[in-house]
Amino acid sequence: MIGKLLDGRYQVVQVLSGGGFGETYIAQDTRRPGNPVCVVKHLKPASSDPETLVVARRLFNSEAETLETLGDHPQIPRLLAYFEEDEEFYLVQDYIAGHTLAAELVPGKPWQESWVIQLLREVLPVLEFVHSQGVIHRDVKPENLLRNRQDNQLFLVDFGAVKQISNQTAIANGPLNPTVVVGTPGYMPSEQGKGQPRHSSDIYSLGIICLQALTGIKPVNFRYDTKTGEILWQHLVDISPELATILNQMVLYHFRERFSSAREVLTALQPLIPANPPVDYPPPPELSPMPPQPPPTPKPVPPVPPLSEQRTVAVGGGNLPQQATSRPSPTPPPRPTSPPSPEPDNLPILLFGGAIAAILALGVGIAFALRQEPGTLGEQTSCTVTVGGLNVRSSPGGTVVDVVEQGTVLALTGAQENAWVEINDPVSGWVYNSEQYIECDAVSQPAEVVSPTPSTSPSPSPEVTQKPKPKPKPKPVDNGVRTLAAATETYQQGNLEKAIAQANSIPRTSSAYNDAQAAIRNWRSQWSQAEAKYNEALQAFDASQWDDVIAYANSNLPDNRYWREKFQQLAAEAKKRQAEAKKEPPPPEPSPSESPKPPSVEPPPVESPEPPKTEPPELPKNEQPEQPEVPLLERTLPSPEE
């Protein structure tokens, strides 16, 4: 990948890290002055199955939009771009030069109490902002807290976007799992391990980091109370009771007992914050896992981008537009260094005039070629989307206002700005003009437009000057109803996230769009209620309250086949356990001393001649029918006195 140009813009110069989801690179933005450094995260989906790619693409776009919002915080790297190439996904973010917090947490070297308080002061406001945006980080750990080398400020990085996509694609064809588990053992609380993270899950992870700093022990080596599940750590450190109380509440086993928000932790911490931060914080790192910042000298700029990525130039003059630094502007060839001929003649003047004419002709020719290139705006009137999920933005590079699907025909207004073009159908906004995303039809130019000088020839005929009308293209087929039906079946099978992704793939232009959004809201509500009720039924089952379990199964259940089957299975098992509990143990075997008694008691019920002699004639009697109808499980054995 070193030296590869991504999206025609980002040139990879160094590999930062690699993992199961893909790789992370340092790259240079060749389209910005000075070729600034950035970080590119690369995701390779686990499968090339079309359905898997659709789900991965939706999740990727959703996470990218979230990161774009979170980038407004000064302690979170900005999202610069996100794109797809060859069915693989890329995120581009600001590069933060520095080291991770893991470099400061040296095993066997505990932190001071004041350092831990300062750490909480730096990180808690970031978590408060993240949670206010409806986001759970799910992977707060020392490796994801990056200290900027310039001002020692901590940054929260790696919001698990690509990890979530990777897990989702990996389980697309596997067992049904409505929630993707993302996190790191040791820093991840119990509810997150079950796929049910909450805001307090991030608070737990930050509390674990503080315990690691105070004790000098890694979380995987912590000891736990076998009865309560709580961490045993206070005997290892000597800190104030107030800070110990705060940290204990941050790392409680049950999420309901922890602080519910980062603001609550900050409020409790306020009395412990010193007037001046410690001068020796942060502790100097003993190692630097982050690679050094690449040299400021830019890499060689890649070749000239294709014509489809350049601006349209004006026709009729010889001036070319300002392009990237790699594209030289046409200049007259240098004069020969050899001394001119001593004989005065008109040859230099003629040569200079010929060079000027050649340059003008070249400019006109390039302008004409650019206007005829299919990827440029020119006289285009419509373009077709060639990828799934193309973003339509409010302005060039602005916020996303809509998403158009593959095959959608876009009507152009004729306005353009750099590589962006304006559309007004099926929605209004701006799209990125690239052959990778849209395919456009150019219309031939009139003959007189490409003439560099006024022509004295007669005006062309109407047949030549009239612009041919573009061929009408068929409107994309509306498959919204079919997609919603497939998503509903997926929901009935128990895969909530996949069903939501399918329903979200229905474009706004579809007649089924409103129904799909209403279905998503209904699914979320039903799933939450069913999950809570099922957990209550499980608690009753563990307490051997069989009647309550059966009552839960017979209550008003959501219209979901997956949850109904789960309740029915649990109720069937409860009925089985209930029947086993009602069974009495068999009568004890008679001892030798009691041997005379059994013959006097046992023969009547066991005697074989009894049924044929006494039972048939006594059937019509009203006194006898009750005894044989007593259920087997409710019968009582005869007492020894009988």
Image: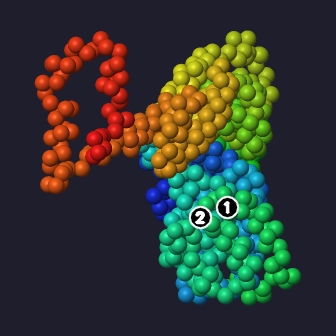
Residue at coordinates 59% horizontally, 43% vertically from top-left?
532
Position in image of residue 125 (x %, y %): 77, 65
The correct choice, above or below, for 478 with respect to 7 in the image is above
Circles 2 and 1 in contact, beta carbons < 8 Å: yes
Viewer-proximal residue, 303 or 551?
A: 551
Crowdedness of circle 1 by 10 Å Cα count: few (<14), some, many (20+)? few
Q: Secondary structure at mark 2?
A: loop
Amino acid type for the residue under numbered disc 2 = Tyr
Task: Find residue 257 and name its label.
Answer: 1
Residue at coordinates 74% horizontally, 63% vertically from top-left?
262
Position in image of residue 558 (x %, y %): 58, 30
Position in image of residue 381 (x %, y %): 70, 24
Residue 84 located left or right of residue 362 = left
Viewer-proximal residue, 133 or 608?
A: 608
Residue at numbered disc 2:
253
The correct choice, above or below, for 259 with respect to 621 in the image is below
Residue at coordinates 56% horizontally, 63% vertically from top-left?
188
